[in-house]
Image (cartoon, rainbow, N blue to C red):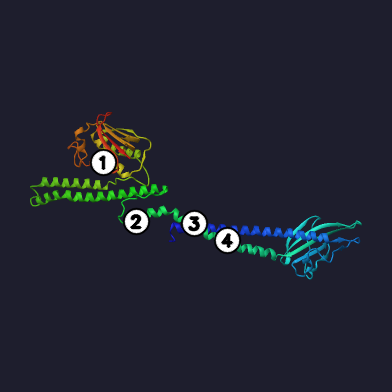
Amino acid sequence: MQVKSLSFRLLVSAGLVLAAFFALASVVLEQGFRESAEQALKEKLQVYVYSLLSAAELKNSGELSMPTNLPEPQFATPGSGLYGFIHLAKKDLVWRSPSAIGLNITPPPELSAGNSAFLLAEHGRYALHYAVIWKNVVGIEREYIFTVTEDAQFVSNQVERFRETLRVWLLALGLVLIFIQLALLRWSIKPLRIIVKDLEAIEKGRKTHLDGDYATELEGLAGNLNAFINSERAHLERYRNALADLAHSLKTPLSILRGCAESFSVNKETVKEQIFRMDEIVEYQLQRAAAKGEHKTTGTIDLSTVVKKISASLGKVYIDKNIAFDMAVPEQSLIYYDEGDLYEIAGNLMDNACKWCRNTVKVTISLNQRKGRRNFAVLLEIEDDGPGIPAGKLAEILKRGVRADENIHGHGIGMAVVYELVGLLGGLLEGKKSEALGGMKWSVYLA
């Protein structure tokens, strides 16, 4: 597994989270077990205190008497780990169990009668102190503190055994969870591996596009990648075709120029004509090759803004005609297309309208239009009040080099570029007479 891979990063992240969780869980569980063991010891020492209380006797003289045979045999065995002490409140020790011979005992804390204190005393022992007021039959009253201590080794051993068991189980559980996480990660990112393999197959020429059954979250990515792949292929194909067409188209003019080279003065007009022809061919092929003809996958372009900019520019170009632009466009019309393609389409159509109009050009943008059985995102309509184009000549206008009026300057390739570009974009281009203005009306449907 590579260090930079998503699987490695996710597995390391999950492992760190699990390690932190298990470490925290271990501390919490260990502390909880220790408190539980200490509570159990406290209850055990409480029983021993009650057994000493039941065995003790306050004599008529006011002295405390303890029997030789104590109820708990460990009190009678030196070094047994269980020790008993009785202090006269606020005074010295009055009794210690035989098991506590030679042991130093820390004085108990001050307690009021009926209260107890459970403490971890010095020398690693737990101690339970219990304060009582004792009154004998003759009315003598004494206040004592009964203390029972036991070595902390018992609790420590229990906690240590629990800690070892807990660590073993948490380690085993952590390893199992990591393997499960690894399996889940491999299963979760399997769609990514599939799409990567399909891209490699496309790169090696075994596939033409992404056609796998991908996860829902990857369908948009696959669609955009397919659009990008198709666009690049189409763009490359157009460049190849344009270069081939350019080379083929220039053969005839070059042959003519070669034949005219020997007598240039006689064939001056022919040379000019062929140079003009070659310029026309080069411009047309370059415009056709440069047209991207693709949907943008990284953002949207506002068509309304585009046509407004074009109308402002054309108003300056044709200032002598004082053209009135009737703009029926929404405030915003976002569409996924290349900005250059939109300028090419709208610019050529609006420029033609300005050339042919008398004084009015109407531009209309409509959203979400349906044509035939297809739905289109936008409909761009450009009309003028000029003479229009005869219906029989509409098809000819869309061919390279054909102009509606040979007296108008130009190469006659603008409409051919628009027609080809709209087709590449998957749209429709329609031309007819404008009912509103009486001139030409071009309708561009873009998906």
Rendering coords of residue 426 (x, y %): 30, 42
Image quadrant in which the C terminus is located: top left
Relative to the observer, which residue lies in front, 248 or 85?
85
Circle 2 — which element? helix
- Mark 3 → mark 1, Cα distance in angstroms: 56 Å
The amino acid at mark 4 is: Trp
Mark before the other along the chain sequence, 3 or 1: 3
Q: Is residue 10 left or right of residue 55?
A: left
The residue tagged 3 is 181
The residue tagged 2 is 200
The residue tagged 4 is 169
Rendering coords of residue 118 (x, y %): 74, 59
The residue tagged 1 is 418
The amino acid at mark 2 is: Glu
- Mark 4 → mark 3, Cα distance in angstroms: 18 Å
The 10 Å Cα crowd at callout 3, few under 14, some 14 to 19, many 20 or more, is some
Residue 401 lies in quadrant: top left
Residue 336 lies in quadrant: top left
Image quadrant in which the N terminus is located: bottom left
The amino acid at mark 1 is: Val
Q: Tell me: residue 232, above or below residue 380.
A: below
Q: Tell me: residue 69, above or below residue 420.
A: below
Q: Are marks 1 and 2 in contact (CB under 8 Å)?
A: no
